[in-house]
Image (cartoon, helix red, strand yellow):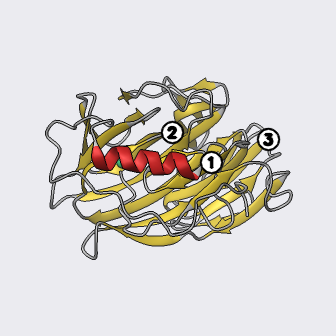
Amino acid sequence: MSNLEREPRETECGGPTGRAGAAAGPAGELLTGREVVLGGPRGMRVTRTLPGRDVRMVGAWCFLDHYGPERTAMRVPAHPHTGLQTVSWLVEGEVLHRDCLGSEQVIRPGSLNLMTAGRGISHSEESPAGRDLHGVQLWVALPAAHRGTEPSFEHHPVLPKLTGPGFTAKVLMGELGGVVSPARVHSPLTGAEITLEEGAQVTVPLRPDFEHAVLSLSGAVRACGTDLAPGPLLYLGTGRSELTLSAGAPARLMLLGGEPFEERIVMWWNFVGRDHDEIVRFRQEWMTGEAFGVVPGAPGTRLPAPDLPGTPLKPRGRHR
Ligand code: MN
């Protein structure tokens, strides 16, 4: 998906500076995020919890939109990305992805679409009208050594599972409890959808060197002592070796984690870069040329980039 805001906020992330000690140990902080309407007043409503005001990243995870369940149609014309991977995950409905590499792939619940933008890619996304849609759109920031990589697209219809009494964790990205996703990642990471059975009392192993966060996709749970329902992102910090979960009724969660991302990045519109001049160049390349390729069959006309803010973009810490 695209950041369709016409006045995207400058978002600077990464780096160990910022809110002292934010990721230096366990936390249990509910991050409410904000409601964003994509594509104008009749657009799709999402809850954006990353980047947040205080916590901008969880590991390399730098963007999290949760949408639905709602009867809506996603229609995102061709737009560019740089320096990131997009991770598309559905609970309900279907979305057709097209990109400038010629990929054309319908994603349905339980399978993963992973697009690695690297040095630059463009894509479009659309869903059929009159259907319920529910899912998340995530971005993973690429570390310096890989951010200029060639663009690529992967579809994974089958993902490995970590299971235990009362729960199943489907591992989308990285590793959880020794179960490793086939998706290509470029930094130590975890991304898993956890389904809980009615009355579940569950302990999921975590890596204490990772920071973690949990989002409820459906249902109410208690996670590491905090009540969590769909909406906010529960930031758990680092230093936890397990995630304790309990649920009275069936629930579905998204677990995100990763090694704290020590590089400073600048996120603006659909680009991840390292400084102001680079973002200016990405924008210019999208607006004036075909450096990002052409998406065959994309709906509508390619999205124009918004105007840059009047003040230079500059990196800050990944936490406030
Ligand atoms: Mn996109």
Distance of label 2 from label 1 (alpha carbons): 10 Å
Q: Which mark is residue 241?
A: 3
x, y percent for residue 21: 86, 56
Residue identifier under label 1: 265
What's the amino acid at mark 2? Gly
**Nearest the camera: 124 or 165?**
124
Residue 240 visible, this orientation = yes
What's the amino acid at mark 3? Ser
Neighbor class of circle 3 (other Cα within 10 Å; few <14, some 14-19, many 20+) is some
Which of pointers 3 and 1 indicates the residue nearer the eye? 1
Distance of label 2 from label 3 (alpha carbons): 30 Å
Q: Are marks 2 and 1 in contact (CB under 8 Å)?
A: yes
Residue appearing at x 67%, y 30% in the figure: 177
Image quarter of residue 133:
bottom left
Residue identifier under label 2: 83
In-image side of 299 versus 60 (left or right): left
Disc 3 Cβ-to-ligand 1 distance below 8 Å = no
x, y percent for residue 114: 41, 34
Assign a secondary structure to mark 3. loop
Assign a secondary structure to mark 1. strand
Disc 1 Cβ-to-ligand 1 distance below 8 Å = no
